[in-house]
Each structure stands twice: as C-alpha cells, then as structure tokens.
C-alpha cells in the first residue's frame, strides 16, 4: 500500500512508517508543495495508486464529492506532535490496510 503524505504532515512520518507502508512518500519529495492545489494532488494520487493521508478536511470533501480512487485517510483535528500522529498511524495500520481493500472513500482516524 502506498501512502501519499500531505504537506500538513511531517516528512519524517514517511521514514517512520516505512516498515508498514514501504512505498509511501511525502508530497515534498515529489515537488507537490508550495502552490500545488489539492485537486492536483488528488489527481496525482489517483493516477499513481496512492492513498492520501492528511489532516486537511478539503481532501475529505473531495473524497465525498468524487469518490475513490484515490482513498483518503484523515487524521482528524491533527494539531498534535509528529510522535502522536505516528502512534495513531501505527496503531491503526491494520485498519488502514483493510480500508485500502474496501470500497469506502474516507477513513477518519481520531486521537484517543
């Protein structure tokens, strides 16, 4: 499973989840930052088989309006440190993998 980390999430997360999601990248690694629209990121993810992982509600709106692919994993109210986001992703790795095989467009992860 390939996760595309949005610019509102730390680049460090890619390396920290590589053992679980080995083909993941951050938008900054692809030059998709600084003026790249959410729709352009959406289309890139769709064309390249990525699931977008983000803290941006705009992607959940796109998922509702356009449906998959791509799929969107939303870290809801992600105003917390990278280590908390990492813990949330790692503790939900099975849910994220199962979501990838589902027909749903959006998975919302909430901090406990």
Image (cartoon, helix red, strand yellow):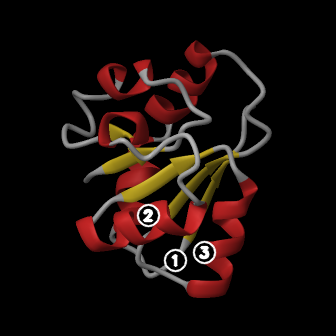
Q: Are marks 3 and 2 in contact (CB under 8 Å)?
A: no
Reply above or below: 89 against 54. above
Residue 45: name its quadrant: bottom left
Q: Residues within 10 Å of mark 2 (few under 14, many from 20)?
A: some
**Which residue is located at x 50 percent, y 48 percent?**
53
- Frontmost residue, 82 versus 28: 28
Q: Are marks 3 and 1 in contact (CB under 8 Å)?
A: no
Q: Position of residue 97 (x, y in %)?
A: 35, 54
Quote the CA–CA distance across marks 3 and 1: 9 Å
The residue at which mark 3 appears reads as 63
Q: Position of residue 65 (x, y in %)?
A: 66, 85
Q: Position of residue 58 (x, y in %)?
A: 71, 61
The residue at which mark 1 appears reads as 104
Q: Nearer the viewer, mark 3 or mark 1?
A: 3
- Frontmost residue, 90 versus 22: 22
Quote the CA–CA distance across marks 3 and 2: 14 Å
Labels 3 and 2: the sequence-earlier one: 3
Labels 2 and 1: the sequence-earlier one: 2
Q: Residues within 10 Å of mark 3 (few under 14, many from 20)?
A: many
Report the label total.
3
Q: Secondary structure at mark 1?
A: loop
Labels 3 and 1: the sequence-earlier one: 3
Q: Position of residue 77 (x, y in %)?
A: 80, 39
Left or right of 1, for residue 31? right
Q: Secondary structure at mark 2?
A: helix
Q: Residues within 10 Å of mark 1 (few under 14, many from 20)?
A: some
Reply above or below: 24 against 14. below
The residue at which mark 2 appears reads as 99
* Quadrant where the C terminus is found in the figure: top right
Q: Are marks 2 and 1 in contact (CB under 8 Å)?
A: yes
Reply above or below: 103 against 82. below
């Amino acid at each position: 499973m390939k996760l595309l980390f949005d610019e509102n999430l730390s680049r460090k997360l890619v390396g920290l989840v590589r053992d679980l999601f080995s083909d993941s990248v951050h938008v900054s690694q692809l030059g998709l930052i600084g003026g790249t629209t959410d729709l352009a990121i959406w289309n890139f993810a769709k064309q390249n088989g990525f699931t977008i992982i983000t803290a941006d509600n705009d992607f959940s709106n796109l998922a509702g309006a356009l449906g998959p692919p791509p799929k969107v994993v939303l870290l809801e109210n992600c105003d917390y440190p990278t280590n908390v986001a990492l813990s949330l992703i790692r503790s939900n790795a099975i849910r994220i993998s199962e979501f990838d095989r589902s027909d749903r467009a959006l998975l919302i992860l909430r901090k406990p």
